[in-house]
Amino acid sequence: MVIGIVGVFWWYRSDQKTPETLLESLPKGVDIVLNDVHHESTRHGVKEWVMDAGRAVYLNSENKVLFENISATFFLKDGDTVLLTGQEGVLNSKTQDMEITGNVVARGRGYEVRTEVLSYRHQKGIICSTVPFVIVGSTIRLAGHGMQFDFDSGRLSVQEKVRADICLKIEELRD
């Protein structure tokens, strides 16, 4: 019986993965894979954005981080926030630029943007898209192809195929 217990213990210990074997099991080019990730970007001590993801794959040689089930909150200078969600994302670890894809939704300032691809340009402080999008607010629905939103100025630019539906309430016209 002692030999059986020792045998089971030896088998259990020999089956444990060492750090070296875990690293060898990663796909080629992948430096590390993490689940339930939280990342923050600050500039001069001011938090610019935070991001949470279900999974992150770091590709250090390419300066990229690949994310799954991403949620990013951007903190605007006026105190407002913009929340971005999507199925996948790619962060450039040098520039802090990111692209979010798959059922992308951005919410902030009383509006909601829906598209399939949305990019964040860190140095410019903008989000942009080159594919069809829809923006919905309490009294407006705006659709188009290609857009850019500047966080600092609050200015939205639409590139082409613009359609706007505006709902004016009769009560507002009487005042």
Image (cartoon, helix red, strand yellow):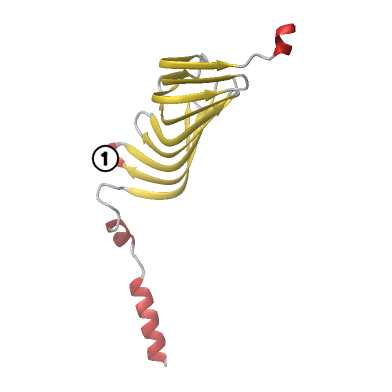
Q: Which percent across, then down, holds residue 60? A: 30, 41
Taking depth in this image into account, of 127 and 165 the one nearest to the observer is: 165
Taking depth in this image into account, of 122 and 140 the one nearest to the observer is: 140
* Residue that label 1 marks: 61
Residue 60 is left or right of residue 144, and the answer is left
Q: Which residue is located at x 26 percent, y 40 percent?
A: 61
Residue lying farthest bottom?
1
Can residue 139 be seen here? The reply is yes
Q: Is residue 8 above or below residue 15?
A: below
Q: Which residue is located at x 45 percent, y 16 percent?
A: 162
Q: Is residue 139 above or below residue 23?
A: above
Residue 169 is left or right of residue 119, and the answer is right
Taking depth in this image into account, of 130 and 45 the one nearest to the observer is: 130
Q: Which percent across, then down, holds residue 134? A: 49, 25
Residue 135 is left or right of residue 59, and the answer is right
Q: Which percent across, then down, holds residue 171? A: 74, 12
Residue 27 is left or right of residue 7, and the answer is left
Taking depth in this image into account, of 40 and 26 the one nearest to the observer is: 26
Q: Which residue is located at x 29 percent, y 48 percent?
A: 30
> Quarter of the image containing the N terminus?
bottom left
Q: Secondary structure at mark 1?
A: helix
> Quarter of the image containing the C terminus?
top right
Q: Bin the neighbour count of mark 1 within 10 Å (Cα to Cα): few under 14, some 14-19, many 20 and up.
A: few
What amino acid is found at the position of numbered circle 1 in the picture?
Ser
Can residue 121 be seen here? The reply is no
Q: How many marks?
A: 1
Q: Which percent across, then down, holds residue 34? A: 41, 49
Q: Which residue is located at x 55 percent, y 29 percent?
A: 107
